[in-house]
Image (cartoon, rainbow, N blue to C red):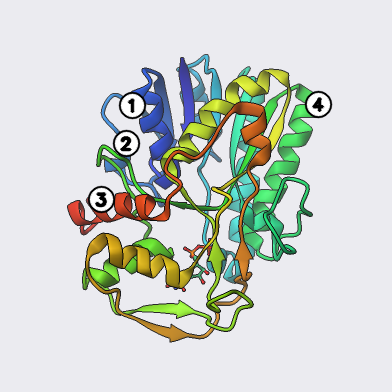
Amino acid sequence: MRYLVTGGAGYVGSHLVAEIRDRGGEVVVVDNFVTGHRDAVLPGVRLVEGDVGDAATLQAALAFGPFEAVFHFAARSLVGESMRDPMLYFRENVGKGAILIDSCVRGGVRKFVFSSTAALFGVPGEGPIGETAPIAPVSVYGESKAMIERMLAWAGRVHGLRVACLRYFNAAGADAAGRLGEDHRPETHLIPLAIDAALGRRPPLEVFGTDFPTPDGTCIRDYIHVADLADAHLRVLTRLDAGSVAYNLGTGRGHSVLEVLRAVEAVGGRAVPHCLAGRRAGDPANLVASSARIAAETGWAPRRAALEAIVASAWAWRVAHPDGFAA
Ligand code: UDP
């Protein structure tokens, strides 16, 4: 089986590529290395360096097909940046997304798996968030992903493209074999920041908000291991034979910021220096997925759901790669 992966040098994309390789599949990666890392492209993976908004790059990549499916990860993904420069996100994510979808349809691609986000749901109501929750993003980033989901729905209706939209909650953790891990620049995510604070490689972590309506006052999120996300991507392919789908992907269990800090301390055996700070704009109190639908329809279940296991894999990668991938 051969697959095309856009953004295959990025965090979640590279872990999917590793999973495909480990299962004996072939991969062609398209990446422009704006946020991806060259060292995250594993040996044996064919690389087409370029942009998903560039038709010639896509033509070159699609020429290595036919592909069983296209997995689309390449995107800008910083909420704060999207609110400072909205048109960047519409151009990069939506405009280039349209070019990619068009090239795929013309190139005879039948299955398309899209890297979507819990940010679609904005500030949702109480309880685990299922697929019927209203799509009401409160950031341009979330809006850009919602718009791509809509474009894909039309590509399905008009061209018969089979689409899986996978809304990730908080992707975390690292490759069990130690080949890959999280390396965003700048890093904004809680677990890698807490690990670096514990390792003394960053100033104390700021806990953003202690007055949320949660048991300890800090925000609750659903952290899901990247390898479990990768597994979900491959499981939905069979399900696509029966039609397009959208799934929310999490463990169904939330953890507060303070619980994450305690998990990092337990795993690392040292304190996480931190201070209590004000809320970060746009943070909902509680985001936990209901993944009942993908479980029922594909048999998927997170196998590394325990927070300490997720943190332990992230810790191991960071200790082995304190500066991340080579610059
Ligand atoms: N967070 C924090 N301090 C930080 C980074 C994040 O308290 O330095 C909190 C953030 O407010 C949120 C949770 O940790 O409640 C997870 O944030 P992250 O940016 O990792 O993911 P998000 O949920 O925003 O996608």
| Image vertical order of residue 193 relative to residue 175, above or below | below
Q: Residue placed at 63% from the left, 43% from the top? A: 291
Q: Tag 1 or tag 4, which sits nearer the N-term?
A: 1
As shown in the figure, which amino acid type bears the numbered disc 3? Answer: Trp
* Residue 317: assigned label: 3
> How many other residues sit within 10 Å of disc 2, few (<14), some (14-19) or many (≥20)?
many
Q: Which residue is mark 2?
A: 41
Question: Mark 4 or mark 3, which is nearer to you?
Answer: 3
* Residue 45: assigned label: 1
Q: Residue placed at 56% from the left, 23% from the top? A: 69
Q: Which residue is mark 4?
A: 158
Q: Secondary structure at mark 1?
A: loop
Q: In the rendered image, which quarter is residue 155 located in?
A: top right
Q: Secondary structure at mark 3?
A: helix
Q: Tag 2 or tag 4, which sits nearer the N-term?
A: 2
Q: Do the numbered discs 4 and 3 sit on residues whose CB atoms are within 8 Å?
A: no
Q: Is residue 189 left or right of residue 234?
A: left
Is residue 87 or residue 116 the one in the foreground? 116
Q: Secondary structure at mark 4?
A: helix
Q: Is residue 35 left or right of residue 85?
A: left
As shown in the figure, which amino acid type bears the numbered disc 2? Answer: Val
| Image vertical order of residue 6 relative to residue 128, above or below | above
Q: Position of residue 168 (x, y in %)?
A: 57, 48
Q: Residue placed at 54% from the left, 61% from the top? A: 221
